[in-house]
Image (spheres, helix red, strand yellow):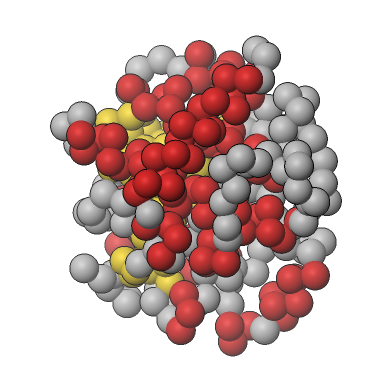
Amino acid sequence: MTGMTSWTANDLPNLTDRTVVITGAGRGLGLITARELARAGARVVLGVRDTGKARSAVAGLNGTFDIRPLDVSDLTSVRAFADSWSGDLDILINNAGVMDIPAARTADGLDLQTATNYIGPFLLTTLLLERITDRVVHVTSELHRQGTIDLDDLDWRTRRHHGMRAYQASKLAVVLFSLELQRRLTAAGSPVRSVLASPGIARTTLAAHSRSNVINRLTFLTNDPERGALSLLYAATQDVPGNSYVGPDGLGGFRGSPAVRRQGKSGRDPVTAGRLWDATADLIGSVAR
């Protein structure tokens, strides 16, 4: 199954009466995704660290927006957001992320990059899962293909920290999380789907501080943010199979229009996916509430 190469945000279905939560939606791909889903009629809840900036960002846009505080790197904030939720939630889009940042620890003592990109979204998803009626969309990266998982040191406590390797590992963890989540949903007879979305290489500020930012100058290799967001929109609204991987259809998955592609081999290992789920749950359980 492949995406239509001409698919754009104008092809979104009518989303009236649908509720969508998007994390990190105050700027970049998350904001574009929020704008387009709201334009299509959805009620869009922006889970953001800076509610004031998010409010300014959506001011004047068409649609219904609900802005709530959420820092996915802070497990207390994640729990508070989930605890305050009432009613159904159709679509959860785990979009918030950081890339190739220096070593730092969160208030919970977790590696900041791993917590933001993977551990926080894992907790948020599992806490909200019984409310979700349609799907979870996990934003990953083509760089998951270079990632390796150390199940004994998910949190970079014993290894020497390396910003880009931590990023790659966190995005591989997201891919494996989707695999195990879909397995559990299917086993439970749930109609809910877990879907992955890669924007390819989108020219956003995500890597502005990183040595890898040089690729943003190579426009022939990259998507502009509007086109990068199409993978998220397609994954959130189109009839794709569970654990689909949606990304650009161009060479290397770097740029192009959204299509259903294939995860890297390391992201299709069900044994590692199951062990990662257990290791993540144990790590979260070890953090004092």
Residue lying at 76% horizontally and 42% vertically, measured from the top left: 158
- Residue 69: x %, y % from top left: 64, 26
Q: Position of residue 148 (x, y in %)?
A: 57, 57
Task: Return the residue nearer the eye: 160 or 2.
Answer: 160
Q: Quadrant of the C terminus?
A: top right
Residue 11 against residue 74 in the figure, above or below: below
| Foreground residue among 282 and 8 | 282
Q: Is residue 31 visible?
A: no
37 vs 287: above or below: below
| Left or right: 204 as drawn, with respect to 142 | right
User: Foreground: 271 or 167?
Assistant: 271
Q: State the residue in front, 203 or 61.
A: 203
Residue 120, image quadrant: top right
| Outermost bottom residue | 220
**263 sits to left or right of 289:** left
Residue drawn at 28 percent across, 69 percent down? 3
Q: Can you see residue 19?
A: yes
Which residue is at the far left? Answer: 189
Relative image position of residue 243 (x, y in whole percent): 31, 51
Whether residue 244 sits left or right of residue 276 in the image: it is left
Q: Position of residue 16 (x, y in %)?
A: 29, 38
Residue located 64% across and 69% down the image: 203
Residue 109 sits above or below residue 82 on the image: below
| Residue 208: quadrant of the picture | bottom right
Residue, x 20% and y 34% (percent of image)?
Answer: 187
Quarter in which the N terminus is drawn: bottom left
